[in-house]
Amino acid sequence: MNSNHLPIRIVIADDHLIFREGFKLLLNNQPELELVGEADNGRSLLALIETTSPDIAFVDIKMPEMDGIEACKKIKASGITTKVIALSMFNDDYLIVEILEAGALGYLLKNTDKHEVLAAAKAVNMGDNYYCDSTSNKLAKLIAANRYQPDKPTKQLKLSIRETEVLTMLCNQLTNKEIAEKLNISFRTVETYRLSLLEKTNSKNVIGLVVYAIRNGYHSI
Amino acid sequence: MNSNHLPIRIVIADDHLIFREGFKLLLNNQPELELVGEADNGRSLLALIETTSPDIAFVDIKMPEMDGIEACKKIKASGITTKVIALSMFNDDYLIVEILEAGALGYLLKNTDKHEVLAAAKAVNMGDNYYCDSTSNKLAKLIAANRYQPDKPTKQLKLSIRETEVLTMLCNQLTNKEIAEKLNISFRTVETYRLSLLEKTNSKNVIGLVVYAIRNGYHSI
DNA sequence: TCGCCCCTCCGTATTTCTACGTGTGCGAAC
DNA sequence: GTTCGCACACGTAGAAATACGGAGGGGCGA
């Protein structure tokens, strides 16, 4: 896609101005990388990619409007050849698996430096994968534990309004009875919602629900 | 502490190089602020403050070795006059309350800009408080809900080894019986640990335990 | 040595959660 | 316009968690 003497054209997507500025500073005196645009959410990233057709997009996972995972899926679905390297604050199993399954070819912690950014860009631009050290360790463990399998079922798990209400109340340590009173329904009904939540989130018990809620923004930590 | 024509002397503490670089860039062409040092964790921040005696320290909450909350407490306890403005990715009740109770006088989201940084520095340097908009909204609600009271009891809630084991297993959706089998103890014993965990974490039920575990690093999301 | 805390276990009672069955109403699809 | 799926609602019954009380052994610092 790029001959060797041409710079790799990249874009950066992150909702934090300061981070973007710091990232740009990292690119100074790196003739091998050329920043051709920046975005502060997933939606504007898609538009940016369409107009600039960069080789690589460095994409923050957590962004407003459209997060990195969603954006990554859309990029992949659209057939655009731009490759995604995920940026994340966290080295968490869940996020790594999600973004890689969404189509990212690299994963860097935000606690990175210019050398790693360059190395990742080069590797991914050549069609390889690139993960920072701690992430590749995690990945090895996940694969060993058989927890990373790109072909998982992924049912539709859109939560209904009532289910969402029950989930958030439940995260605030309300019992079924208390939730029932607040919603003016029988506490048996609340139990029904709880059950369907267990199914939809593929959880064994309420603990799984809480973890799901936190992961998916239904409850803040 | 500073006469009006002298710059406010500040330091920045954050474990992310990119963020620090971006933050420094923000200070360009701002003669009212002078950066006199930077640190990448709480421990080195304390040393830095001791040698440079800055007016203000911008401190990330989440840092390795010693986090911002701990560092803030130590600064306050030592009698140093340096004032702390917290930096955080998150606008979460828990973090806001924690860092303010630790002695921070300001709270900025990392999604900030040069104007806000300057405004915060000026305000705090004059002895005022400064919170970004969304945070002050949160604070108002917390105070209204009577959830922000600086004189909370804060029992010793150091968890024992067994309690920690039970807590982490429980976060992995294991039942008491399953935990008992893995630990080779009676499931009644597991119940005992669970009860003491509920007490120590001031939780109403297992959901509170999970939230506590996630907040305090016993379980990753 | 004494007190304190941790680890371990148990009995009993109550509350809460989980599993499964049943039914209604509404909108989409055929 | 009937069928189908789904959100919504409630019930019974059994499993699990929570509450409260008691008890013995061991480690460790005052």
Image: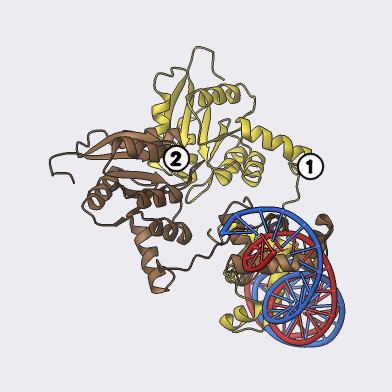
Chain colours: A yellow, B brown, C red, D blue
* Residue behind mark 1: A146
Tell me the chain of label 1: A
Q: Amino acid at mark 1?
A: Asn
Residue B95 is situated, as x and y percent measured from the top left of the image, at 46, 56
Residues indicated by labels 1 and 2 sit on the same polypeptide chain: no
Which one is in front, B145 or A186? B145
Residue A200 is situated, as x and y percent measured from the top left of the image, at 71, 62
Tell me the chain of label 2: B
Callout 2: few (<14), some (14-19), or many (20+) C-alpha neighbours within 10 Å?
some
Q: Amino acid at mark 2?
A: Arg
Which one is in front, A66 or A135? A135
Q: Secondary structure at mark 1?
A: loop
Is D29 left or right of B72, judged from the image as shown?
A: right
Which one is in front, A71 or A203? A203
* Residue A105 appears in view: no
Q: Name the residue rendered at 67%, 82% in the picture.
A: A187
Q: CA distance from mark 1 to mark 2?
A: 39 Å
In the picture shown, does residue A54 fall above or below B47? above
Q: Residue B43 got which mark?
A: 2
In the picture shown, does residue D11 fall above or below B178? below
- Where, by quadrant of the figure, is residue D15 drawn? bottom right
Q: Name the residue rendered at 30%, 37% in the picture.
A: B26
Q: Which marked residue is nearer to the observer: mark 1 or mark 2? A: 2
Is A52 left or right of D12, judged from the image as shown?
A: left
